[in-house]
Image: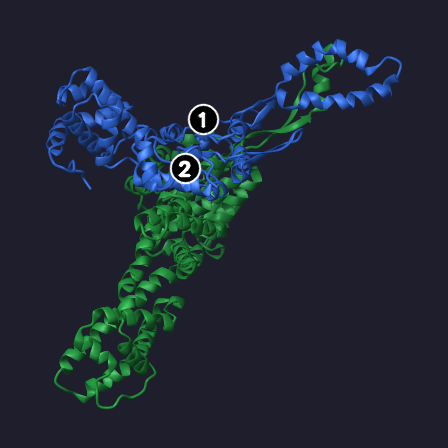
Amino acid sequence: MSDVLLDFVRAARGTGIRISPAESIDAVQAMNALGWEDRAALRDGLGLVLAKTTEEKAKLAECFDLFFARSDMKRPEAPEAPPVADQQAMAGAAGEPQGGGGSALGEMLRAADLAELAARMERAAEEAGVRNISVFTQVNLYARRMLEQMGLRELEREIARGGPAVEQLRQGRDWLRGEARALVERNLQLFARGETEKYREEMLRRARLSNLDRRDVERMRVLVRAMARRLAARYARPRRHARRGMLDARRTLRRNMPWGGIPFRTIWKTRRIEKPRLMVLCDVSGSVAAVAQFLLLFLWSLNEALSGLRAFAFSNRCIEVTDVLARLPIEQAGAEIMAQVGFGSSAYGASLEDFDRLAMRELNHQTTVLVLGDARGNRTEARADLLREIADRSKQVIWLNPEHPLAWGTGDSDMPRYRPYCKLATQCATLDQLERVIEDLLRASA
Amino acid sequence: MDGGARLVTSIEAVEAGLDDCGYIASRQIATAVFLAQRLHKPILVEGPAGVGKTELAKAAAQWLGLPLVRMQCYEGLDESKALYEWKYGKQLLYTQILKDKLAPMLGDGEGLEGALAKLHGVGDIFYSEQFLEPRPLLKALQQPHGAVLLVDEVDKADQEFEAFLLEVLSDFQVSIPELGTIVAPVPPLTILTSNNLRDLGDALKRRCLHLHIGFPAPKLEARILATRAPEAEEGLRRQLVAFVQALRGLELKKLPSVSETIDWARVLVLLHARELDTQVVRDTLNVLLKYEVDIAAVEPQLLAMVDKARADALTPNYGVPM
């Protein structure tokens, strides 16, 4: 029985739930405690042991239903299968041409013996190894293998020979084809999801953010959150960390000079960890919008590791969006910001002037200013002097440009004028690049 | 194998047992308690505030007839507050009292080394169990017949503490350098609760059965109300539940929880309300909603909502908007 459970664990892993070997052992124990009879209890139990968040629970329940839908079909019928039909089936499966009589499959179709057909199909699926299916292009291949296993060739021959019930047989054959495909597809859903999902995620990490497919956006968000959480967990440390039991001898002596060096007041060593204070300026004009959205999402998910994040969005003017992001879930916030300033043609000079008015005074030597934009100001004034002032007042300016460095300075790009004031100017077009930049930023301040 | 004061035989038994203690458990909750007893694993309970996470531990303790050991987590909690501490005061006091005894025992003429050697033999006395102050975790492990250990709001503790908790929860034993390892004779039924203030570590989640308690379905909530606020009349209870369920469908800052429903029912009983009407609801809305914004958001729809709740209460399934 535990084989079935292991298959189930494999299928569940395919849906993206992380299950460790220890947890699968727990699952076996839980199953032993609960028994197989009460399906609802088993589902609850496995949910408790294997799934560790609400989303995972939902996924697991869905997977459970899908997985055990199959055995449902199998269980009642298998014992009833008459031995005679079985033998005939074997003969059919071996591909022996049968003389005058109809094929075994045709026989069953004529008798409309659905139970037996379903059982046969399960058996054929097992022999064809449907469980090893990994990509959807294999569906037809596996479906055909299964049908051949069941004796499709004989059925075809019978249909070709013609006869009284040929129309009925033809319909039956088409129905069988449909059923076989459905079964293979269900297996694909169960067992192949993991492979394809992994592959897709790999691709997405490297895909250019600006030309993402609509349907990938949701998946991308999950990916971004996961990335951010990983970073946050690594860098979200208390800012002041006492190094337990380490006496700061030098400072203690100094402090106790008034008492003749007798240590009345002890001073202990502490380690201070600075969290980066971050101001983000995001270009949300048409060309950069997609990247900006992910940058904001990324930073927002990083909240634990950052302190005092302030976000500004601009195209032809600049507004602060910190409270919009705090108030709304990030997906809606994106739309809201876009509605306010998005999609205009960008004017960097005007936007920098706005920023000057909004937040210049609040920059200090701890602040990192992160600018995301392509620096294409549509031939408006660049106001690089303002960026210089920002650079002077803050700790550093980092410029992320979705364009390749070769394109900087071509056409209306003002990048060369801004570049001297940036501590780092780098290309940032994919999620991988984004993660690297942010990680460097966090590490530098840790 | 099963060391609890009561033998847990089936999920139904758990359900019935908790029911007797005034805790209406959903099927999932009962399954979790059942499995926790069987597999000796801690349960990690997550869910919004006020759905009865802490209450579950209390009810379980009452039902199993075991002592409840509660540990409230907070930022800065460390081992000396969670596990054990030496009774420094007592140690000092005893050395003072025993001072007279010590002098002759150490002998006068044997010199420093001889005295030191003798002192070595004595030293361990002061680090024995008499001078050990057990804190919740140790206390739970020491109970001879097992216990219910409630680690409340584990998400409020630091990550370091979480790592430390892992050691205790996986083997149900702790090592005290001066005494050796203390192993629980009977593993305690452990319930950890979390309000999701921060994400807990994967390692901790992996060690635990993960139970999510959400807002209850109307039927269940009605049953809970019947046990917790029996003074309220049946008709009122049904209207209450329908109203609160509808409220949870709205976009609010903080949705009312079961505990708020119960409070509200008690308030209404005190006010001698026999059924919901707009005036009563408006006056007592602050029991259900804890933010000014939320109250302001609900106020204009109040009339419609009360009417709907009264109508829904008459239908058998409480007319849940699904």
Q: Chain of mark 2?
A: B
Quadrant of the rendered structure where residue B150 is?
top left
Residue B13 vs residue B124: left or right? left
Q: Chain of mark 1?
A: B
Q: Amino acid at mark 1?
A: Pro
The answer to whether one can see residue B257 in this image is: no
Residue B90 x, y percent position in the rendering? 63, 14
Looking at this view, is B61 or A45 the one in front?
B61
Residue A105 vs residue A2: left or right? left
The letter of the green chain is A
Residue A374 x, y percent position in the rendering? 42, 49
Looking at this view, is A429 or A215 the one in front?
A215
Q: Residue at x 26, y 68 (%)?
A: A80
Give the labeled residue for mark 2: B7
Quadrant of the rendered structure where residue A174 is?
bottom left
- Residue A156, numbered circle: none
Q: Is residue A444 above or below residue A179?
A: above
Crowding at mark 2 (Cα within 10 Å: few <14, some 14-19, many 20+): few
Q: Amino acid at mark 2?
A: Leu
Q: Secondary structure at mark 1?
A: loop
Q: Earlier in the sequence, mark 2 or mark 1?
A: 2
